[in-house]
């Protein structure tokens, strides 16, 4: 996969590639959901919670290299100024090439474009590489839900992080 990364809004035409990416990258390092079925005709990536306008995709050399999902934190008017990263995935073949960082920058730009002044996310406590990346991009830990998930019989913390988009 070439090093040049392009970020663009997702389209319905990305559906199959996004499903494939999720199937290939699933891990308890970042997912609390059961391992998805690897069967042909897997469910659509897009649904009532995840619409194309919520997703930015990264391309490298014409191949889908990753995505970030940017959504309102809640449907409440009182926190309409907050957006949440509801998923960040990078293809294993594209790791170490700045794809995740480029997606984070694009997510912050998109959240600002939508009028947000704050961007939040949740990361599993044992996902040290992701936590280091988020911290290097200005995210700070604002809370920890200790032992929130049992993954493979092990209690894992849910770490709440956020950053300001002002300035």
Image (spheres, rainbow, N blue to C red):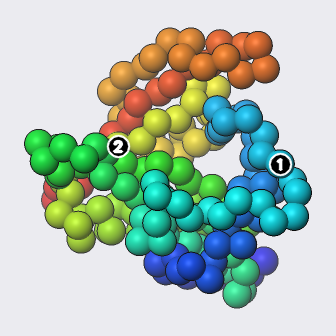
Please report whichever mark, 1 or 2, sits nearer to the chain's N-terminal start. Answer: 1
Q: Is residue 100 left or right of residue 95?
A: left
Q: Residue at x 47, y 49 (%)?
A: 86
Q: Position of residue 149 (x, y in %)?
A: 60, 19
The residue closer to the viewer here, 104 or 157, is 157
Check disc 2 and report the residue beneath it: 120
Q: Which residue is mark 1?
A: 37
The image shows residue 76, relative to residue 28, as above or below, that is: below
Q: Residue at x 46, y 58 (%)?
A: 48
Place of residue 144 in the rendered image (x, y in percent of width and height, measured from the top left): 43, 19
Spot occupied by residue 134 in the image (x, y as percentages of width and height): 47, 44
Using the rendered image of the protein, determine whether residue 100 is visible from the camera's viewpoint: yes
Q: Secondary structure at mark 2?
A: strand
Alpha carbon distance from label 1 to label 2: 29 Å
Q: Is residue 95 visible?
A: no
Instruction: Determine the image quadrant of residue 128.
Output: top right
Is 78 situated above or below 127? below
Tell me the residue at 62%/83% (across/down). Answer: 13
Residue 85 to residue 153: above or below? below
Whether 66 is drawn above or below 88: the answer is below
Q: Position of residue 164 (x, y in %)?
A: 23, 47
Q: Residue furthest bottom?
A: 62
In the picture, the quarter occupied by the C terminus is bottom left
- Estimate how packed mark 2 is, as few (under 14), some (14 to 19) or many (20 or more) residues with alpha carbons within 10 Å: many
């Amino acid at each position: 996969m070439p090093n040049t990364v392009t970020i663009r809004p997702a389209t319905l035409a990305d559906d199959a590639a996004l499903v494939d990416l999720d199937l290939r990258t699933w891990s308890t390092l970042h997912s609390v959901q059961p391992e998805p079925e690897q069967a042909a005709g897997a469910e659509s990536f897009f649904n009532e919670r995840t619409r194309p306008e919520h997703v930015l995709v990264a391309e490298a050399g014409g191949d889908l290299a990753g995505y970030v999902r940017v959504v309102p934190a809640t449907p409440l008017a009182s926190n309409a100024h907050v957006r949440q990263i509801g998923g960040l995935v990078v293809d294993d073949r594209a790791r170490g090439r700045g794809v995740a960082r480029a997606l984070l920058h694009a997510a912050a730009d998109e959240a600002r474009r939508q009028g947000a002044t704050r961007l939040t996310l949740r990361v599993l406590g044992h996902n040290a590489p992701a936590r280091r990346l988020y911290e290097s991009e200005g995210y700070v830990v604002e809370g920890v839900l200790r032992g929130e998930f049992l993954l493979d019989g092990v209690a894992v913390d849910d770490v709440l992080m956020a950053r300001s988009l002002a300035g």
